[in-house]
């Protein structure tokens, strides 16, 4: 099949490369000249494990363009994967989606092309786009909602071995055609109405964030009552009704999707006349969670003015260079506001653009040199493997706050560190 994808961001690129792997012809269109130039040279504008190799392998079925007409020519499926960032009000900004719709020419050369929405949009967007297409004389263009559930760092496996594929269509036959694009993948296909498909995406992300905020609150109580949240999560997660996933306590969830999607769902509910109380709490818990580390440091070090704090890991999670909504951003801001000197290191994320006033080190050990405290922010495997005895000899004060409960507390204590995790016993 001939597939065009609007938006060569993380979602568009992974989707395009995977569809090419499944044998489809894919054209990716983006508005950023640099992005298209980089892709034409065979390089990737984003870091995603395995993506470059996948694009390379399917190069003959993939092309990249800035030109709308070139993207649309012969396309049977017009996927929309442009960004839908939050506005100040918390609603999703759909201007990039509408630009794509407005750019569609009236005379398309394919009999019934289908617009397929991959970007996460508020419930009701499909109906608005349908009405806009009809009003522009494009009633013969189909519309299908086909949300993505890709998690960064494991996005290719997420596409090729999905838990489910959700297809919401106004016309059954349009839904059949979109479902057929995934032929060969072993996954249940959930066929729904367009609004239900839109809601599946928002509800899934809202539920995942609720689980994380829930376990973070349990962790905070564990600290007060002498329990260990990692053991609690194991015990809770073995209940088949609850399951083990998204029960890792830490210093809060981040990423490009969670914050904006949860806030978009809360806003959508509010705009529709319903106050979504639970989500308000989920968001607030997360905001506070990112800041709790500062209090932990103050309890150990007193005032942070002039104290050197090393942030280990900047990306919102390991396996990506993405720092959008990363807890590291809030943490660095709070520490600087308290007068601390902040150094940071990440194996791939480049903190220089977003972290003003933070010294970026070339290695974890360099970041730790002369530090009064280390905060593990992102659970990169490199940090578990770090030579912590070397770290101990370089630091001015041996204090580790493990924001992801990843390190071996006993081992670190043996090396003379004060160790504090999230929701765990403090010595
Ligand atoms: C995006 C959405 O943010 C998310 O809600 C959705 O689920 C999937 O698509 P992501 O791929 O991470 O996620 O976004 P981003 O990396 O911002 O990529 C969007 C791309 O669209 C960028 O390359 C941007 O240049 C491009 N774009 C944006 C267009 O091609 N046209 C526009 O009008 C605006
Ligand atoms: C998420 C969803 O998983 C995906 O389905 C959706 O399409 C986009 O948003 P992603 O943002 O890539 O994917 O990362 P994810 O692995 O879900 O982690 C999100 C955040 O939650 C990270 O900051 C992570 O550190 C945090 N998290 C996750 C926890 O704090 N504890 C957990 O148990 C799980």
Image (cartoon, rainbow, N blue to C red):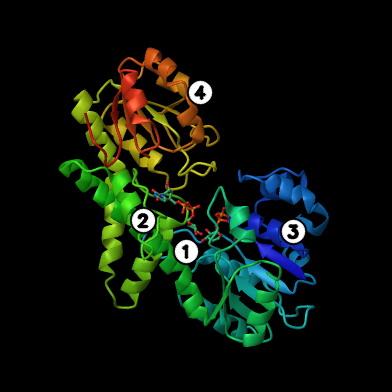
Residue nearest the observer in this picture, 313 or 137 = 313
N-terminal of the pair, mark 4 or mark 3, is 3
Question: What mark, if any, has residue 363 been given in the picture?
Answer: 4
Mark 4–mark 1 Cα distance, whole angstroms, equals 38 Å
Q: Quadrant of residue 188?
A: bottom right
* Residue 373 in view (yes/no): no
Residue 87: % across, % down: 41, 60
Q: Which residue is mark 3?
A: 21
* Residue 47 in view (yes/no): yes
Report helix, strand or loop for mark 2. helix
Q: Quadrant of residue 160?
A: bottom right
292 w.r.t. 107: above or below:
above
Q: Is mark 1 within 8 Å of ligand 1?
A: no
Q: Quadrant of residue 224?
A: top left
Q: What quarter of the picture does the N terminus occupy? A: bottom right
Nearest-to-viewer mark from 4 and 1: 4
Nearest-to-viewer mark from 2 and 4: 2
Question: What mark, if any, has residue 237 been given in the picture?
Answer: 2
CB contact under 8 Å: marks 4 and 3? no
Question: What mark, if any, has residue 93 been given in the picture?
Answer: 1
Report helix, strand or loop for mark 4. loop
Residue at 39% of width from left, 12% of height from top? 393
Q: Residues within 10 Å of mark 4 (few under 14, many from 20)?
A: few
Residue 218: % across, % down: 25, 51
């Amino acid at each position: 099949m001939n597939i065009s994808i609007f938006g060569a961001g993380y979602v568009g690129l992974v989707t395009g490369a995977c569809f090419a792997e499944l044998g489809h012809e894919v054209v990716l269109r983006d508005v950023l000249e640099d992005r298209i130039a980089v892709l034409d040279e065979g390089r990737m504008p984003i870091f995603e494990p395995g993506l470059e190799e996948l694009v390379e392998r399917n190069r003959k079925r993939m092309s990249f363009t800035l030109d709308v007409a070139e993207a649309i020519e012969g396309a049977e499926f017009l996927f929309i994967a442009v960004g839908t960032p939050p506005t100040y009000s918390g609603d999703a900004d759909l201007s990039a989606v509408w630009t794509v719709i407005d750019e569609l020419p009236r005379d398309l050369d394919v009999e019934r092309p289908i617009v397929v929405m991959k970007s996460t949009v508020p419930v009701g967007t499909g109906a608005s786009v349908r009405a806009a297409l009809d009003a522009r004389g494009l009633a013969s263009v189909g519309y299908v909602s086909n949300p993505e559930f890709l998690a960064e760092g494991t996005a290719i496996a997420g596409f090729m071995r999905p838990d489910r594929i959700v297809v919401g269509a106004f016309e059954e036959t349009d839904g059949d055609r979109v479902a057929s694009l995934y032929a060969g993948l072993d996954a249940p296909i959930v066929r729904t109405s367009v609004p239900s498909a839109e809601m599946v995406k928002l509800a899934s992300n809202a539920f995942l964030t609720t689980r994380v905020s829930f376990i973070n609150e349990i962790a905070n109580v564990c600290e007060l009552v002498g329990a260990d949240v990692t053991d609690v999560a194991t015990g809770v997660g073995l209940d088949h009704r609850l399951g083990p996933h998204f029960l890792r306590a830490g210093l809060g969830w981040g990423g490009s999707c969670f914050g904006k999607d949860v806030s978009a769902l809360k806003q959508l509910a509010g705009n529709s006349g319903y106050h979504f109380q639970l989500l308000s709490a989920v968001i607030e818990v997360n905001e506070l969670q990112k800041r709790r580390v500062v209090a932990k440091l103050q309890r150990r070090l007193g005032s942070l003015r002039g104290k050197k704090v090393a942030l280990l890991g900047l990306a919102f999670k390991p396996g990506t260079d993405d720092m959008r909504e990363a807890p590291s951003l809030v943490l660095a801001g709070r520490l600087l506001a308290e007068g601390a000197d902040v150094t940071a290191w990440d194996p791939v994320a480049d903190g220089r653009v977003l972290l003003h006033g933070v010294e970026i080190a070339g290695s974890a050990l360099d970041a730790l040199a002369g530090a009064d405290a280390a905060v593990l922010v992102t659970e990169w495997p490199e940090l578990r493997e770090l030579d912590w005895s070397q770290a101990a000899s370089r630091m001015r004060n041996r204090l580790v706050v493990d924001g992801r409960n990843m390190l071996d507390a006993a081992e670190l204590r043996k090396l003379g560190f004060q160790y504090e995790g999230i929701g765990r016993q403090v010595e």
